[in-house]
Amino acid sequence: MTAWFTLRNVVVAGLLIVLALVPVYASVTGNAFLMTLFTRIVILAMAATSLNLILGYGGMVSFGHAVYLGFGGYAVGILAQEGMASGFLQWPMALAASALFALIVGALSLRTRGVYFIMITLAFAQLAYYFAVGLERYGGDDGLTIQRRSQFAGLINLSNRTVFYYLCLLLLVGTIYLVWRLANSRFGLVIQGSRSNDRRMQAIGFPTYRYRLVSFVIAGTICGFAGALLANHTGFISPAIMHWTRSGDLIVMVVLGGMASSFGPLIGAVALLVLEETLPPLIRLIAFPFVEQPVALKISEYWQIVLGPLFLLVVLFARGGINGLLKAVGRD
Amino acid sequence: MTDALLQIEGLSKRFGGVVASDDISLDVPKRELHAIIGPNGGGKTTLIGELAGEIVPDDGRIRFDGDDITGLSIYRRSALGLARSFQITSLFLDFTALDNVALAVQAHSGHSFRFWRNARRDPELREPACAALARVGLAQRADVMVANLSHGEHRQLEIAMALATKPRMLLLDEPMAGMGPEESARMVRTLRELKQELTILLVEHDMEAVFALADRITVLVYGRVIASGTPEAIRANVEVRQAYLGEQEVAGHG
């Protein structure tokens, strides 16, 4: 418990150093794509960390968490479209809209358990998805281009890619710290106890519903924040951001990285998104000596055939995801 | 009986065609250990469920310390000081023993909308939890994951958790189920100590323990009270002998 120099901590520390040095490396090599990729990783890691609060610690399998990315993103996009580019307006709106929607979804879904809970959160997310598709004024299915990033009265210039990246990284670290504090507070122990045995929690005197609801709203709000960042990052928002497959991605990040661990979602986000980028060229490289170039290209489109089994292996053999694996290996 | 802590009047419950509680009335005075015995399916666990608030009775009334609690939720009853232990061990298996008891302490020390301080280092929670563990003889096992404790230790832990909620009354549902002789003897010792200061309703199959501990015994058969009285009276009751206690078993205790 007191040993700090474990394999997992070394990996986590290394990961944080790499994340901190990405802009330096990118500017030296002039690799703009790397910045784009890692800004995206950092923002989605923040979303996954928020999901971990309810999924990992609380045992609430929300299959509609990406909907808050949409709420945060559309708050920024719609306000920008209407000529209100101030971040002081956009960001609080993004948080408030996400919180309100999470309150509604949570209030209804948390009265149910198991598959019903999953289905209700999914249904609400799909509802929001189709609502956004119908928003003709804001691009409907095609989405909405955001001309300017959120303006903060000259205090901070988000159009500077490096500044924006470090802001996202700072917010990610802040989120990880916040979730860690929450998870180990009295509040967090109620959430965790409820995951372990909700009936017993009530029998010893906890009205668990209200605690679970508050955690659900906190998670949705943080994810909405990530959505506002993502919209700024891509300069574009469309219904696709809250498609159920995106919610699935967030779950995969949390489970792959390690549920109920502070850095698990970050590890999972890095692993998933880096694999997503590196697997296709890797497959092409391996396949090329054996087949023609076009065929190799075709094969590499099926990179998910490799990712799927990898994910399965981690779920089956590494309880606690990659984080748990690192801990277990470090102990031996 | 004015000083009865728990008063049950005409409690009835049917599940379809099965009568689980049939007009049950009984009083449990303060600091008495009242045992409920009866054959399997006699309605004992249903009664505990009704008292704890998990099962809503069709009819009848439950008073706790004079207040009608029939319609109160589970956690409200717990807050009033009615603590139950479960027949089938129902613990937080992925938590340590101390964590389990500390949660029970936390449940009764104000609301838990406290988001920042590390609850596992909060002496307000940890110290009473350690004390409760010590009372049931589990102090040495505080940091063991509950999933790795033995069955007997689980039962002890159940009692510690009930104690940690600072209850006025314990509802114990077969605390000795599945225990070996030594574990049972230890549990009897623990309960004997607890009954000095607490009112206890005990559902138990272990007749030796029941007759050693109980001030009063109620016999439930098919949800109906067929006898209620002191252990001596119950032992002598012909109807009880026929319905439940084997003749030899009674003789063995005679």
Image (cartoon, coloured by chain):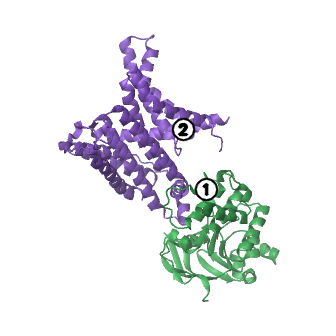
Chain colours: A purple, B green
- Of residues B20 and B179, the one nearer the viewer is B179
Query: Residue B50: in sight, yes or no?
Result: no
Q: Amino acid at mark 2?
A: Gly
The chain letter for the residue carrying disc 1 is B
- Quadrant of the image occupied by residue B27: bottom right
Q: Position of residue B202 (x, y in %)?
A: 66, 72
Measure how far apart labels 1 and 2 are at the Cα level: 27 Å
Position of B87 relative to A23 (above/below)? below
Q: Residue furthest bottom?
A: B2
Task: Determine whether the residue tagged by mark 1 lies in a helix, strand or loop.
Answer: helix
Marks 1 & 2, CB-CB < 8 Å contact: no
Residue at label 1? B121
Quarter the N terminus of chain B occupies: bottom right
Q: Residue at x 34, y 32 (%)?
A: A161
Tell me if B107 is positioned left or right of B196 in this view.
left
**Kind of residue at disc 1:** Arg
Measured as percent of width and height from the top left, residue A181 is found at: 51, 51
Residue A71 point in image, percent of width and height: 31, 47
A296 in relation to B243, above or below = above
Q: Is residue A227 above or below residue A329?
A: below
